Image (tube, coloured by chain):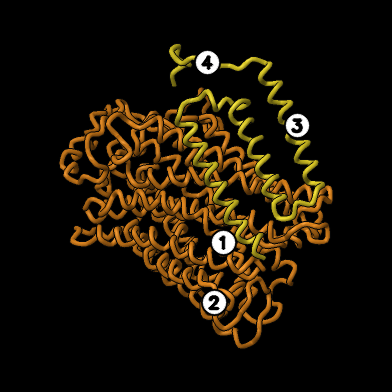
Amino acid sequence: MDQGHSKHEHHTPGYGIYIIIWLVLIGLTSITVTVAGIDFGMIALAIALFIAAIKSALVINIFMHIKFEEAIFKVFLLVSGMTLVVIFLLTFFDVYNR
Amino acid sequence: MANGVIAENNRSFFEESTNRHSGILSWLLTTDHKRIGILYLIAISAFFIVGATFGILMRLELIAPGETLMGPQTYNSFFTLHGVIMIFLFIVPGLPAIFGNFFLPLQIGARDVAFPRLNLLSWYIYILGAILVVTSLLLPGGPVDTGWTFYIPYSVRTGTNVSLAIFAAFVLGFSSILTGLNFVTTVHRMRAPGMDFFRMPLFVWSMYSTAWIQIIATPVIGITILLVMMERLFGIGIFDPSLGGDPILYQHLFWIYSHPAVYIMILPAMGIVSEIIPTFARRTIFGYKAIAFSSLAIAFVGYLVWAHHMFTSGISDTARWIFSFLTFIVALPSGVKVFNWVATMYKGSIDPKPPFLWVMSFIVLFSIGGLTGLVVGSLATDIHLHDTYFVVAHFHYVMFGGTGTIFFAGLYYWYPKMFGKMYNIKVANISVGLFFVAFNLLYFPKFILGYQGMPRRYYDYLPEFTQLHLISTIGSWIMGITLILIFANLIYSLLKGAKAPQNPWGGVTLEWHISSPPPLENFHEIPYVDHEPYDFSLLEKMKNESH
């Protein structure tokens, strides 16, 4: 195992960014809660998932530092993410056609 | 190749330890992948024997209609425990944890896995999960009676120790995830120089595909279990319809994990078959890349078929035909494998030693299991056969006839390498034959029973089913005797067996280039790999390596 090599620069966003992201996440959560109270019918789920997707993207990229990592980690994460999307889609074939 | 020449006075990993302790502590605190593999072998075999005992006792109850040995509640607990132990403690962790741990580093020319301490932690987590399962039997409330699937709403309402049992499954999941993580990293980072992905033995490919399923699918069951806990403990309505939940959602989430888990069980077995056939046919594997990629294809398509377990649960018609269609696609990569194995044997110089015989019975039993899978994968026939003994027969042919048979094949193939002892070949041959007969007596009548309408999970049945149930029970006795023979042969050889040579079968993958049992750090010099994995022209050269 080699130690963290010197040529690899360590990007660390400042605390300011973390706090902004945190506020954005709280904002998005309150939107989710508000939207849940309005009757959007079939698209309510799509809206909730869309907001959740933005939130996870922020957490994964900034809090989990994936934005600053090597390409291979991004590829692996993308594969897992795509699997999840496919699983969601297939489940919707059931839920929306019952 | 294998320029790692081994010193004459070499000490094996049994005699040398990774820590300064001796005796039992040197095992319990070891970070050596081989010792951890053996720790798993002991624990997993023990649970297999417990699970098999439950199975044999259930068959005894079913020898005649009416109550013969146990009442309905005990029977419900027995089939649940048989399922939970066999699935979560034997067949899911079995092959990756035992043979993956022991042979993955050896086959890629590494000294250990990427994270040896994490590897030991995985074993402890496995043991913790197992202790929780056992505890759930003994506490007031009584053993779980839901079946291994813990279907909602019954599992939320039953008074038995469901919370503890599913928590055990949650804990065992972490053991699985950590093992997967370890293997993916090991395959990416620890291969010997020259060993690119297409020079890896096929067992390594199958372990790699399995590890990915363990990482991606297992968290789903973890989350599902947490949701059930929230529902049981705090009354939050998620799955229970009386609380506003959706019971079919539970089945979706459960099978989103548990169907890929079927491939966690079978892929390593397919990898071991791809090792054994070339060795005993003295021919390179037919269609190396096709087999390697079919492992990945099975791992991927395995994610897309889960709802074929739910055709009769009330899911939408659209979903039903889509999942039925996708299910048939799995047959393609599985067929690719079977045809390639058979093609490998064509014009080979076949040496029918016990591991090879195990593989032959695997091909027959697994093919029956696979083909009857198409019967229950078709929408129309599944409506008739769902929840009958047909399904019980089908998954025993796939799981026990598939993975279980290969557990023994792997054990009989690698036993001389693991322990440096040789077992009695004649007794081993008899065990395979007896196993094949016992297996078909035990499970084939269940296909007919299911077709005639015998439902699953009942301790009692109508008189017209008596004869077939009796045949099946007799099969279970022969199976019990065979299992004793299989294990007794190995244990006796461990104590009194002849010393095994370095390469008893004439295999050419890297594990056969080192002494039996292997030295502590596997290779004195990391080998350089400049050829494909099953190049039998190496055998002549390898004769000089043996001691």
The quadrant in which the C terminus of chain B is found is top left
Report the amino acid beneath label 1. Ala
Can residue B477 be seen by looking at this rendering?
A: no
Label 2 residue SS = helix
Which of discs 1 and 3 lies nearer the camera? The answer is: 3
Label 1 residue SS = helix
Report the amino acid beneath label 4. His
Mark 4 burial class by Cα count in 10 Å: few <14, some 14-19, many 20+: few
Judged left or right of residue B321, residue B84 is: right
Which of discs 2 and 3 lies nearer the camera? The answer is: 3
- Residue B492 is situated, as x and y percent measured from the top left of the image, at 43, 52
- Please check whether the numbered discs 1 and 3 fall on a single chain: no
Residue A26, image quadrant: top right
Where does label 3 land, which residue?
A: A27
Using the image, determine if residue B67 lies above or below residue A83: below
Report the amino acid beneath label 3. Gly
Out of A53 and B286, give the one closest to the viewer: A53
- Please check whether the numbered discs 4 and 2 fall on a single chain: no
Mark 3 vs mark 4, CA separation in Å:
29 Å
Where does label 1 land, which residue?
A: B52
Q: Residue at x 63, y 81 (%)?
A: B64
Query: Going from the N terminus, do you reach mark 1 or mark 2 first?
Result: 1
Mark 2 burial class by Cα count in 10 Å: few <14, some 14-19, many 20+: few
Mark 1 burial class by Cα count in 10 Å: few <14, some 14-19, many 20+: some
Where does label 2 land, which residue?
A: B380
Label 3 residue SS = helix
- Residue B114 is situated, as x and y percent measured from the top left of the image, at 46, 30
**Which chain appears yellow?**
A
